[in-house]
Image (cartoon, helix red, strand yellow):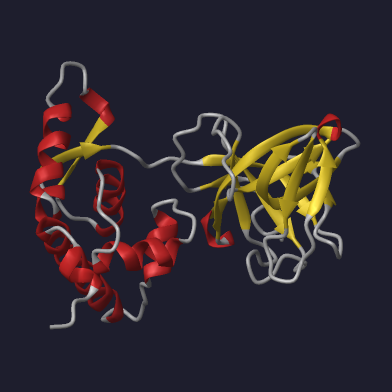
Amino acid sequence: MKTTFRDNLPAVQLEEAEKLRAIFNQRRNESATVGSRITQTDVGEACGWQSAQSVMSQLMSGRMALNVDMLIRLAHVLKFSPVEVSPRLAVTIDLVSRLPRAGKLFDSVDGYRIPVISGSIPVTCKATLAKDGGFTAQNDSYGMLTIFSPDHSAYGLMISGNALMPRIRNGEIAVIEPSRECQAGDEVLVRLKDGQCMLREFIYQRDGQYRFDAICAGGDPVFVNEMEVQVIEYVDAIVKKSRLRGSNSEQP
């Protein structure tokens, strides 16, 4: 008998995936009745995940196992009690919610207490892209982005231009988390000491230089002397302009 990838996955992982998929389909059908449309990408972006559609697809197929953080985010976005999807993880969430002084750090969803993750971050920079995708950051107040970040120093970078399509489109906003450590393969914001900036994929630091690859197909790698680099900051997500609130939210 031919085996599939699902045959090698833990039963509990597949059960949780099936329950999550059922809730997603229910919410999608509910939104359709009022003339709206919810996609996997919408949910993943609302959870603050990079590669939003891919993560959601893997979670709902069982290829990726749920963890507490993922379950909490999904429970907020899709409005369900954690125990409906994962009783095993819900036990941990419930135990933490009962600790002394949990207080306002927890909210109630259908009577089940889960951590509050709603929040916003300031959009403080704008990138007007050159043809090669480079830019000089323009610092100003461009409003608040409705998204959660565990990094208290997180900020939004508004993108103007289409040089980084299809990965990043005009008007979209990159969520930057300066406190997060960057690993090989991460998308990053690179600020050079001469004021130039670029959004790239971090490949390595070796022999006194960095290698950064293009985040769009067909781009050439860039090698930068480490003495020329001011800072490298982690790019957590790319989100739609519709999440922007504030006086300058009308500007691309």
Is residue 17 visible to us here?
no
Position of residue 95 measured from the top left corner of the image (x, y, whole percent): 11, 29
Residue 201 locus on image (x, y percent): 66, 52
| Residue at the image point whose x is 22% and y is 56% from the top | 79
* Nearer to me, 251 or 183: 183
Query: Foreground residue, 71 or 80?
Result: 71
Q: Residue at coordinates 20% horizontally, 39% vertically from top-left?
A: 114
Q: Is residue 90 left or right of residue 170?
A: left
Figure quadrant of residue 251: bottom right
Q: What percent of the width, then of the height, locates residue 138?
A: 81, 44
- Figure check: 218 above or below 1: above
Q: Is residue 151 visible?
A: yes
Q: Tell me where residue 241 appears, x and y as whole percent.
A: 59, 60
Q: Of all residues shown, which one is farthest toward the top?
A: 100
Q: Quadrant of the C terminus?
A: bottom right
Instruction: Examine the image and state in which quarter residue 115 appears.
Output: top left
Q: In the rendered image of this protein, does residue 60 appear above or below residue 89?
A: below
Taking depth in this image into account, of 34 and 204 the one nearest to the observer is: 204
- Residue displayed at 22% across by 75% down: 4
Query: Which quadrant of the figure contains the N terminus?
Result: bottom left
Left or right of residue 61: residue 241: right
Q: Residue at x 74, y 71 (%)?
A: 218
Which is nearer the eye, 81 or 166?
166
Q: Is residue 129 left or right of residue 245?
A: right
Total labels: the figure holds 0
